[in-house]
Amino acid sequence: MQDHTNLVSRRSLLKTTAAAGASVFTFLQPRLVRGAGKEKLRAGIVGCGGRGTQAIVDTLTGNENVELVAMADVFPDHLDSSLSQLRNPKVLGRHAGITVERDGKPQQMSAEDLVASIQPRIKVAPESRFTGFDAYLKLVKSEVDLVMLTTPPGYRPMHFEAAVEAGKHVFAEKPIATDATGARRFMAAGRQAAEKRLSVMSGAQRHADAAYVETVQKIRDGAIGEVLALYSHYLSTPVFHAQARDPKWGDMEWQHRNWYSFVWLCGDQIVEQHFHNIDFINWVMDGHPVSVTASGGAAWRPREPLYGNIYDHMTSDFIYPNGVRLSSHCRQYPRAYNDVSDLIVGSKGRSTGNDLGPKGINSQVQEHIDFVDSIQGRKPYINQASRIAESTLTCIMARESAYSGMTITWDQIMSSKQELTPKEFGYEVKMEPAPLPVPGEYKFV
């Protein structure tokens, strides 16, 4: 079942197609500059941490015609570690159990099958291993067909712009920005990608999950009646990437190695993690909220450098155009109750969001299959840039409401001049982190 929000933009598809002087058939069946018709597709990845390494495994597991030929990361040790894991049968075998489709039926990949399938397609020559703050530029200008962007999200807008400018198809991990300025940059580059017929797939894997896809369709078809209320939780434990600062690290390097503690890099939990729930609710509602009033703070995070400048809990009350409200709650507490769930309440029943459809193959593998199918024209053209940007902005809108203590509207966030991206990059760049936001003192811009 096709998720119609994958197709460029809900509102601009026909308009863009007509302006380009192309038929709808041509637009939905791309035969694109790079990759289309080739026996093999050459992939490169920017961001070689845990998420990036898993994305490589997922795309190579789902697509036997894809090879990894280039890697880029700010830190050489990250790149070396990722490549070492991908070349180590014992480590790679730990990813066994991924469900894929073979001979028309779902089946789990054994460790032996996974290693035998993936390792021969890891072909990253020394000259195609790029490190440093300009590594992404070197990779997108190399001979790759598709680029996977899996760095911290603060870098996503500039990396996406560079990849589209270079004519590459892009898998962009969620979220796609940490401020409204960056989200709008991503939207603009997404429109350019559509003009170039470049496929854009996001890491919002629920849109590739058969259970979610069919459940959303049944909700829209009236299975639970009129939607009356919405609830989403992302209650989890803290995320850290460094436990102490090495004296050799400059300010910028320290913040990168502990990126989840700093808002310019991660966006706070509601943007980086709770995105999945909020993006899903936007999908159910076929649009974004018109306003939000949120509250939050740091209940347990000490005012120490390791803990940065993000909140550890946040609740948000979103209002959609038809008056339906979403009650959203996210928090990261140590040694506490965990719950990641959604509830859609209708006039005739309720749904958890994935309870009205069949279980499909691993959704993080399926999204990469769909991406490659779009590139090679086997299935409808996918460009999720507009949708993922809208969901990212929805999350940013709530964060800014909690930080400022104000109700924030969609028009306000679309006009926000906030820009968190530094003007200078380098391992030794001096960076004083912004203080923890205090409602009433923090200024929304």
Image (tube, rainbow, N blue to C red):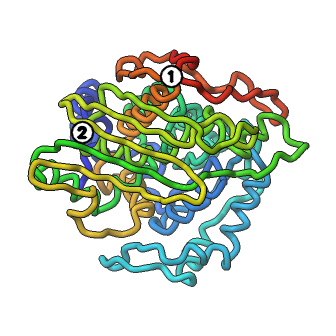
Above or below for 43 versus 444: below
User: As shown in the figure, which amino acid type bears the numbered disc 1?
Assistant: Ser
Rounded to the nearest angstrom, the CA distance separating label 1 from label 2 is 28 Å
Residue 52: which quarter of the image? bottom right
Q: Is residue 239 left or right of residue 289?
A: right
Q: Residue at x 45, y 66 (%)?
A: 62
Q: Position of residue 394 (x, y in %)?
A: 39, 33
Disc number at residue 404? 1
Q: Is residue 6 left or right of residue 408?
A: left
Above or below for 196 versus 97: above
Q: Nearer the viewer, residue 263 or 95?
A: 263
Q: Nearer the viewer, residue 282 or 131?
A: 282
SS class of the residue under badge 2?
A: loop
Is the N terminus in the top left, top right, bottom left or bottom right quadrant? bottom left
**Residue tagged by mark 2?**
286
Q: Is residue 111 left or right of residue 80?
A: left
Q: Position of residue 130 (x, y in %)?
A: 73, 47
SS class of the residue under badge 1?
A: helix
Q: Residue at x 66, y 68 (%)?
A: 86
Q: Residue at x 33, y 60 (%)?
A: 209
Above or below for 63 versus 322: below
Q: Residue at x 76, y 52 (%)?
A: 243
Q: Position of residue 172 (x, y in %)?
A: 50, 45
Q: Position of residue 118 (x, y in %)?
A: 57, 71
User: As shown in the figure, which amino acid type bears the numbered disc 2?
Assistant: Asp
Labels 1 & 2 near each other (Cβ < 8 A): no
Residue 140: which quarter of the image? top right
Dot 1 or dot 2: first in sequence order is 2
Q: Is residue 441 left or right of residue 10?
A: right
